[in-house]
Amino acid sequence: MPAVSFQNVSKTYRGGQVKALDGVSFDIAQGEFFGLLGPNGAGKTSLISILAGLSQASGGRVEVLGHDVVGDYAAARRALGIVPQELVFDPFFSVRESLKIQSGYFGVRNNEAWIDELLHELGLSDKANANMRQLSGGMKRRVLVAQALVHRPPVIVLDEPTAGVDVELRQTLWQFIARLNREGHTVLLTTHYLEEAEALCGRLAMLKQGRIVALDRTSDLLRGRAATMLRFKTDDTLPAELQAQARVTGRIVQIKAHDASDVEALLAVLRAAQCRVEDLEIGRADLEDVFLEIMQGEPAQQGVTA
Ligand SMILES: Nc1ncnc2c1ncn2[C@@H]1O[C@H](COP(=O)(O)OP(=O)(O)OP(=O)(O)O)[C@@H](O)[C@H]1O
Ligand SMILES: [Mg+2]
């Protein structure tokens, strides 16, 4: 039985004007660390909201450990720990109180030891008695993570959990989530930090305009696409024939090369155009390269009015 099963899920908003999800189907096996990637507006949060029972699909079916999220809502919800993208919290309670209330909501009693461990692991021990409204944005997000984990759910869903979170907590958070994953928890993660997804996720799905455009093991996605990247800095304008294939960030330019002779040909074009190149590097493609290639390569879906 899969941990999560999405079966032909669709979602439209505003009476069908906005098609946020269009026939999304995939399963996440128990114990997987799974990444759901896609640009802003691709439909990631819409899919997670349906999984969480917060919004209803326009079509299709979603199951958590065999429980239909509509027909068997309570069991499906209990199996899930969800860290929402939006910061939602009750300003009247302290951190510890809000975790106790969340425990009570799931019928978990005598949860003090686990609450203490969560506070410790998430660097919140010294904020346990602080009021929620006294916390910084990053700390509120840590509390959301603790709230999601308070009933030790078998399936952990994180919708951009590291947005606005400092480097140190990102590292401790991922160590902690990776430990829970090793202990058997299934993890579904969305993030725009593609190096996080590359490091953590065994398998990835990429969503574009509500459709799955890639679904594979992370290692196979990296191997199967752009193999080699030429990276350099320049203040000059790139020759026209390279502009279409280059990815430019400020003065940093990255161009895909298939093999060594491709690299030589690219350098020859740059030299002929008298384009001065600094800090030249030849490296392997990373997930960001693969992501951009897939997003640019797939034709836009029809019938979407954003
Ligand atoms: N309540 C809503 N009413 C109308 N349209 C909505 C609503 N929620 C989402 N949408 C639309 O559905 C599409 C998918 O949005 P969604 O929030 O699922 O994207 P996302 O992949 O999570 O993006 P991001 O990376 O920015 O979080 C977008 O076009 C969005 O404008
Ligand atoms: Mg989102």
Image (tube, grey):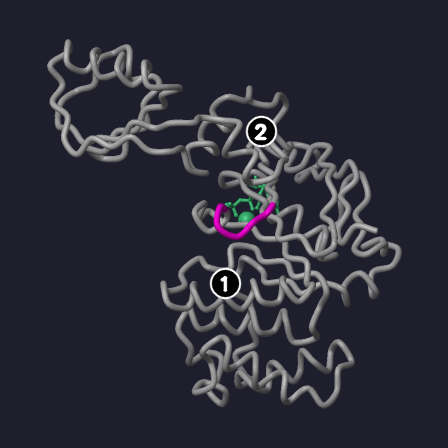
User: How busy is the neighbourhood of tag 1: few (under 14 within 10 Å), some, or many (20 plus)?
Assistant: some
Magenta stretch: dominant secondary structure: helix
Tell me: 109 left or right of 220: right
Nearest the eye: 74 or 270: 270
User: In the depicted view, which residue is nearer to us: 12 or 64?
Assistant: 64
Residue designated by label 1: 174
Residue 64 placement (x, y as % from top left):
79, 55
The numbered disc on residue 218 is none
Q: Pointer 2: residues within 10 angstroms few (<14), some, or many (20+)? A: few
| Type of amino acid under label 2 | Thr
Tell me, yes or no, whether the highlighted magenta stretch contains residue 212.
no
Outermost residue on the front side: it is 260
The mark nearer the N terminus, 1 or 2, is: 1
* Magenta residues (range): 198-202
How far separated are the C-alphas under marks 1 and 2? 36 Å
| Residue that badge 2 annotates | 305
Instruction: Tell me the quarter of the image containing the C terminus.
Output: top right
In the picture shown, does residue 169 fall above or below 86?
Answer: below
Q: Who's the residue at 67% across and 40% down the image?
A: 13
